[in-house]
Image: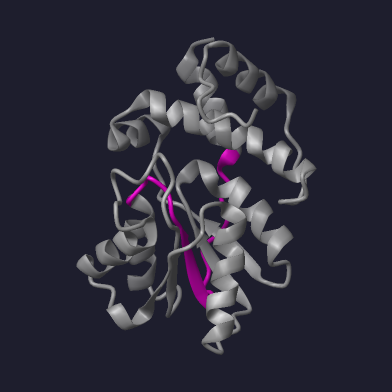
Amino acid sequence: MSVMDDAQILWDYHQLHHEPRNTDIAIGLGSHDIGVAEHAAELWHEGRFPLIVFTGANAPTTVDVFPRGEAVHYAERAQELGVPADTILTETRATNTGENFTFTRDLLDGLGIHPGSATIISRPYQQRRAYATARQVWPELDVVCSARAQSLRDYVASIGDVGHVLNMLVGDTQRVWVYADKGFAIGQQVDARTREAFERLVAQNYTSRLIQ
């Protein structure tokens, strides 16, 4: 089995295929992928939610791309795509997925906004972990996950760095069980096929995003 075959197995595992529905807010999770902001804008124009919160400071993988912070650059991109500034909030402190939700809830509480439902918008292979984290950190929030629909190969082409994508895929997969064990996220089943593909990619040295 090729490296890309194994990557496809991990990619498929992280797709949740939630049916889109209208929610009180959207939460756009910061990352290296500006497609999150673009997808949020698409859904806003469809009328899926009235308010978007972009959340994210910086990480080693994003500081060069988004020097003023992930949330700030996401908000600017959404505005370029026609989303009004007064329908966007930015949370600029979060440096991990748990903080994305915790700090977003704190921000909204401070503004007297108490959503009952949210569309979580993330890069495609972050969906499963984002869902598991939200259920742990903000259990009363009714969430649906969404990401731009695209193939793994198209995603790699859009990012322009196959090694980076594969390393991130491997890292996100490991975090499904590691973060559940640490209490950061709810537990999820990992089938044998996914686990074996993960182990083969680790053996191929796609390890830069692993938690040691």
Region of the chain picked out in magenta, as a range: 14-34
Q: Which one is nearer the viewer's eye here, 105 or 14?
A: 105
Residue extending farthest bottom: 112
Residue 22 among magenta residues = yes
Residue extending farthest left: 80
Query: The N terminus is located in which quarter?
Result: top right
- Number of marks: 0
Residue 120 appears left or right of 79: right
Q: Residue at x 77, y 44 (%)?
A: 182
Find residue 27 and report its horizontal and vertical position in percent.
49, 66
Find residue 190 and report its horizontal and vertical position in percent.
73, 33
Q: Residue at x 66, y 71 (%)?
A: 141
Q: Residue at x 42, y 80 (%)?
A: 50
Q: Is residue 121 above or below residue 207?
A: below
Find residue 56 and report its horizontal and vertical position in percent.
45, 58
Q: Which one is nearer the viewer's eye here, 158 or 47?
A: 158
Residue 5 appears left or right of 144: left
Residue 51 among magenta residues = no
Q: Residue at x 43, y 54 (%)?
A: 30
Find residue 118 and report its horizontal and vertical position in percent.
56, 70
Q: Quadrant of residue 170?
A: top right
Q: Which one is nearer the viewer's eye here, 82 or 95?
A: 95
Q: Is residue 202 above or below residue 41?
A: above
Q: Is the image coloured rainbow, by chain, by secondary structure, or in one colour?
A: one colour
Q: Is residue 157 above or below residue 141?
A: above
Magenta segment main secondary structure: loop
Query: The C terminus is located in which quarter?
Result: top right
